[in-house]
Image (spheres, grey):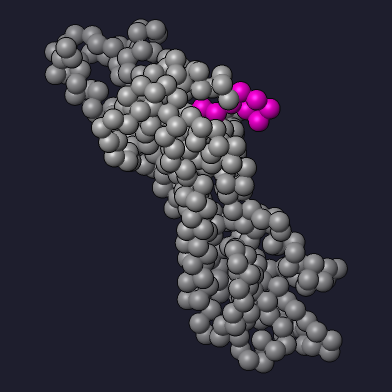
Amino acid sequence: MLSVDRLINYFEQFSQVLHVLELYRKIYEEFLAVPVSKGMKTEMEKFAGGLYTTSVEAFIPNTGRGIQGATSHCLGQNFAKMFDITYENEKGSKEMVWQNSWAYTTRSVSLTFLYYKWNHVGVMVMTHGDDKGLVLPPRVAPVQVIVIPVPYKDADTTAIKGACESTVYTLNQSGIRADLDIRENYSPGWKYSHWEMKGVPLRIEIGPKDLANKQVRMVRRDNGAKIDVPVINLVEEVRSILDGIQENLFNTAREKRDACIEVIKTWDEFLAALNNKKLILAPWCDEEEVEKDVKARTKGELGAAKTLCTPFDQPELTEGTLCFASGKPAKKWSFWGRSY
């Protein structure tokens, strides 16, 4: 039986692990606009040597594969025992330390850090990208707004350029990351494609007509919508549109992800869903040998299926529900599928 002190340490660690996991969720959902599921890894999939591993899991509908977004590990006292890491408690006696582990902000520039960093970027690119190129959520886009002059024949190019420069200055002074493309050796159309490929969330075009009407034309990267906005309302409208783009990217990604979730209860249903590139939610007996067997039975050119995580948000498990793979009484619902 665990002592009171050991129980307190255990629950303090669990609280800390979940706190970091929630920070991960916020980064993915509120900044990268990528929906994720929070859950627990199985004994097979957890960090080697750790007590348990929690994770946020993303899913790429276009490829039908899950991807581990980020992990937060409870190491318990396992590594303390291996390396003899102790501390002196309030009673003056030595005890083994309790440890947790994560990587988002505590790692310096190393190969491991770069792996985690580009893993996050890769998930975002695969989630939002389209045939034109990148689609960047405004909150993480290095350039949120690109301003492009559109001079027609006999237009006052000096005035148009001045209006563009004024627009960029006003936006930058308001905390919006804006840039100006005044390269003369490229046409406006070429510039549109160039910045669309780079994923800039919002494009502002200023031509003779806009100059005369004291307005700018805004074009959204996420859906291509165009809107003419009076210069006097520039900052407010840009902020509103950027917020709308951020929200739309997340909602669209979540709808696509949710449409791929398939709840199954039998092996045949599992195989059909796997072949249809679904994110599978299945009742499971929580036995490691069964998990290994599923991996072995689905091994092929596309890779084997495996557990992605056991979500904390568990659907009701009615009495008599059987494991999809073994036929034994199910103990939990878990996400399964192919993964990166």
In this picture, is 137 found above or below 77?
below
Residue 279, how many percent across, how many down? 50, 40
The quadrant the C terminus occupies is top right
Tell me, yes or no, if residue 240 can be seen here: yes
Please name whichever residue, 129 or 310, is drawn nearer the observer in this view of the structure: 310
Residue 148, how many percent across, how many down? 71, 73
Which secondary structure dominates the residues rendered in magenta?
loop
In this picture, is 51 found above or below 58?
above
Residue 178, how many percent across, how many down? 60, 66
Is 319 colored magenta in this rendering? no
Would residue 182 appear left or right of 9 to someone viewing this image?
A: right
Taking the view exactly as shown, the residue that stands out farthest to the bottom is 212
In this picture, is 334 found above or below 6?
below
Q: Residue at x 23, y 13 (%)?
A: 88
The quadrant the N terminus occupies is top left
Q: Residue at x 58, y 25 (%)?
A: 298
Please name whichever residue, 154 or 302, is drawn nearer the observer in this view of the structure: 302
Q: Residue at x 32, y 31 (%)?
A: 321
Residue 184, how many percent across, how many down? 83, 71
Please name whichever residue, 82 or 271, is drawn nearer the observer in this view of the structure: 271
Tell me, yes or no, if residue 40 can be seen here: no
In this picture, is 234 found above or below 339?
below
